[in-house]
Image: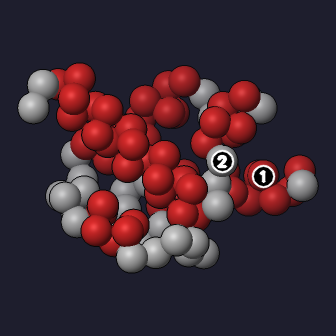
């Protein structure tokens, strides 16, 4: 897989995890709650995650969850962004 292909794979995983946790990453970015550097860091952390290979199957078995699994290196990002979004709702 090319580097770009790998990045896109992990970007999709991050977006799917956001969707599963009820965290709208695109809205967080538009609203200034997620900076470009943080977005890149989230994808980079996903790329370095040893559990990422199991993530697609985990996501397929769950449509909606309260929070990302404890194995997810971005769990805190998702929780913080979700809390900010809940405050504004």
What is the quadrant of the C terminus in the image?
A: bottom right
Compared across the picture, whether 68 is left or right of 70 comes to right
- Which residue is located at x 37 percent, y 62 percent? 72
- Between 78 and 60, the one lying in front of the other is 60
Compared across the picture, whether 87 is left or right of 64 comes to right
Q: Would residue 36 be visible to someone looking at this image?
A: yes
Q: Would residue 70 be visible to someone looking at this image?
A: no
- Which residue is located at x 66 percent, y 31 percent? 29
What is the quadrant of the N terminus in the image?
A: top left
| Residue lying at the far left of the rendered structure | 1
Cβ atoms under marks 2 and 1 closer than 8 Å: yes
Q: Which mark is residue 76?
A: none
Secondary-structure class at tag 2? loop
Residue under pointer 1 = 85
Among the 4 quarters of the image, the one containing residue 21: bottom right
Secondary-structure class at tag 1? helix
Residue 41 position within the rendered picture, expressed as x and y whole percent measured from the top left: 41, 35
Among the 4 quarters of the image, the one containing residue 61: bottom left
- Between 58 and 70, the one lying in front of the other is 58
Q: CA distance from mark 2 to mark 1?
A: 8 Å
Residue under pointer 2 = 24
Residue 84 position within the rendered picture, expressed as x and y whole percent measured from the top left: 77, 52
């Amino acid at each position: 897989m090319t580097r770009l292909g790998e990045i896109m794979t992990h970007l999709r995983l991050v977006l799917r995890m956001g969707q599963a946790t009820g965290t709208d990453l695109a809205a967080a970015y538009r609203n200034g709650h997620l900076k470009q550097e943080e977005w890149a860091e989230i994808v980079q952390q996903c790329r370095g995650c040893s559990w990422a290979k199991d993530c697609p199957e985990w996501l397929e078995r769950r449509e909606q969850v309260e929070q990302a699994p404890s194995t997810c290196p971005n769990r805190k990002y998702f929780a913080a962004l979700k809390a900010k979004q809940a405050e504004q709702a």
